[in-house]
């Protein structure tokens, strides 16, 4: 059969739609609630490309971050290493990435990594206009060059084994000098796969911003397990609006938390409202027909799992020692009443610690589940 040309065009048109559909980019949105009147932005302030010692072209960093549901990333090439194939202007990687970011409406922050031996170690400068003046063998000259540009300056991976073989984060005199000059604003509590609890304490004592970043060099999926709960470490920024200026204001005001693996790390003033916004619980009339049991449903609407540990005993009830509520899930928790408890509805307060919400180096978030429990008659 000979197809009329109009039919052929129609068939080609359909094939075209199928092919375009199959190659569409998909963004996996991250669900973490907005809190305290701010928008919760998901950010990574430390990534590399082939313009220093990374393995991908700068625009790929934007594609990856967009697909993973991030709102902003910073391009932070090492000033001290450049790939011989792309030597020259230290701003070029950001320019390429930023062009790509505009297409998605993503925020791409211009940054750089000042890369010195320990001490002082490695430092990222964010929100700069020009990285080139910071290329100096003298650390203080480099830092002053970015400070003059009103950069947000952060101390990277203090416990990295490449510089501290025992993995211990150390604070040196040079860091005190930076702090006194107003040239140090934040520290990485998390870098790549590492969490430095001591650094969380430093941030709290010295009023510094907590950051958690990927420091990714490889294609992202070759280093981090993505999907099914896997994600790169990221800094949650509680911003007044979704703009670069608002991120900068929030970073200087220390309004951040860090999401690393199953852990949320940060100040209680942010972690408690996140817990409250992502959690709900209800007494339910379960089908259990055993004497003196009651059920409670615990719902987690976010992408962060909840790991609860009982904090103390309740004389009249037997409560589970541990409860895990996976991301975007509901679990039914069963509570047993002891002999002296009457059947019917009881108002109870169940004390737990959210052990994966780290409000300090050695402390999870204490909560009390205030709820009704309905103890029913057994059959
Ligand atoms: Zn580094
Ligand atoms: Zn780095």
Image: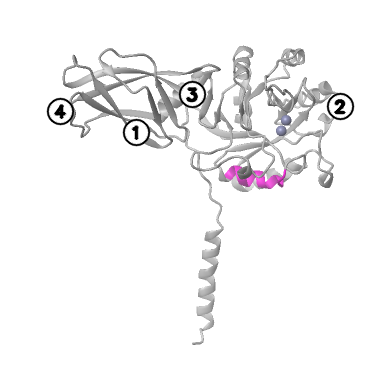
- Name the residue that disc number 4 marks: 378
Q: Are marks 3 and 2 in contact (CB under 8 Å)?
A: no
Which quarter holds ligand 2? top right
Q: Residues within 10 Å of mark 1 (few under 14, many from 20)?
A: some
Real-space Cα distance between discs 4 and 3? 38 Å
Sequence-first tag of 3 and 2: 2
Mark number displayed over residue 137: 2
Q: Label the magenta part by its dominant secondary structure.
A: helix
Instruction: Give the CA separation, mark 1 to mark 3.
Output: 19 Å
Question: What range is drawn magenta here?
Answer: 55-66
Mark 4 and mark 3 in contact? Answer it, CB < 8 Å: no
* Residue 3 x %, y %: 51, 84
Tell me if residue 180 comes above or below residue 152 in the rendering. Answer: above
Q: Position of residue 287 (x, y in %)?
A: 20, 34
Q: Which mark is residue 2?
A: none
Distance, label 2 to label 4, CA atoms, is 78 Å
The residue identified by callout 3 is: 357
Q: Residues within 10 Å of mark 3 (few under 14, many from 20)?
A: many
């Amino acid at each position: 059969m000979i197809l009329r040309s109009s039919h052929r065009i129609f068939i080609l048109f359909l094939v075209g739609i199928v092919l375009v559909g199959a190659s569409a980019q998909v963004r996996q949105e991250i669900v973490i609630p907005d809190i305290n009147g701010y928008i919760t932005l998901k950010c990574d302030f430390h990534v590399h490309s082939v313009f220093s010692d990374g393995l991908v072209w700068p625009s790929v960093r934007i594609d990856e971050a967009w697909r993973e549901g991030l709102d902003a990333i910073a391009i932070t090439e090492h000033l001290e290493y450049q790939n011989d194939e792309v030597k020259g202007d230290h701003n070029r990687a950001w320019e390429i990435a930023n062009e790509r970011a505009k297409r998605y409406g993503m925020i791409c922050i211009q940054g750089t990594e000042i890369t010195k031996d320990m001490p002082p170690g490695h430092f990222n400068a964010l929100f700069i206009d020009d990285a080139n003046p910071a290329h100096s063998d003298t650390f203080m000259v480099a830092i002053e060059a970015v400070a003059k540009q009103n950069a947000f300056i952060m101390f990277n991976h203090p416990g990295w084994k490449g510089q501290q073989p025992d993995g211990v984060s150390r604070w040196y005199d040079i860091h005190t000098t930076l702090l006194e000059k107003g040239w140090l604003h934040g520290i990485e509590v998390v870098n790549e796969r590492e969490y430095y609890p001591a650094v969380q304490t430093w941030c709290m004592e010295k009023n510094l911003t907590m950051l958690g970043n990927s420091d990714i060099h490889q294609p992202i999926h070759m280093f981090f397990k993505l999907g099914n709960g896997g994600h790169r470490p990221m800094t949650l920024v509680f911003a007044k609006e979704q703009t670069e200026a608002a991120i900068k204001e929030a970073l200087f005001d220390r309004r951040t938390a860090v999401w690393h693996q199953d852990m949320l790390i940060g100040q209680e003033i942010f972690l408690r409202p996140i817990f409250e916004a992502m959690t709900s619980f209800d007494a339910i009339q379960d089908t259990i027909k055993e004497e003196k049991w009651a059920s409670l449903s615990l719902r987690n609407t976010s992408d962060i799992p909840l790991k609860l540990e009982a904090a103390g005993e309740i004389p009249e009830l037997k409560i589970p020692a541990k409860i895990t509520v996976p991301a975007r899930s509901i679990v039914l928790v069963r509570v047993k009443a002891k002999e002296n408890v009457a059947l019917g509805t009881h108002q109870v307060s169940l004390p737990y610690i959210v052990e994966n919400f780290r409000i300090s180096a050695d402390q999870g978030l204490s909560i009390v589940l205030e709820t009704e429990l309905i103890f029913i008659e057994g059959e």
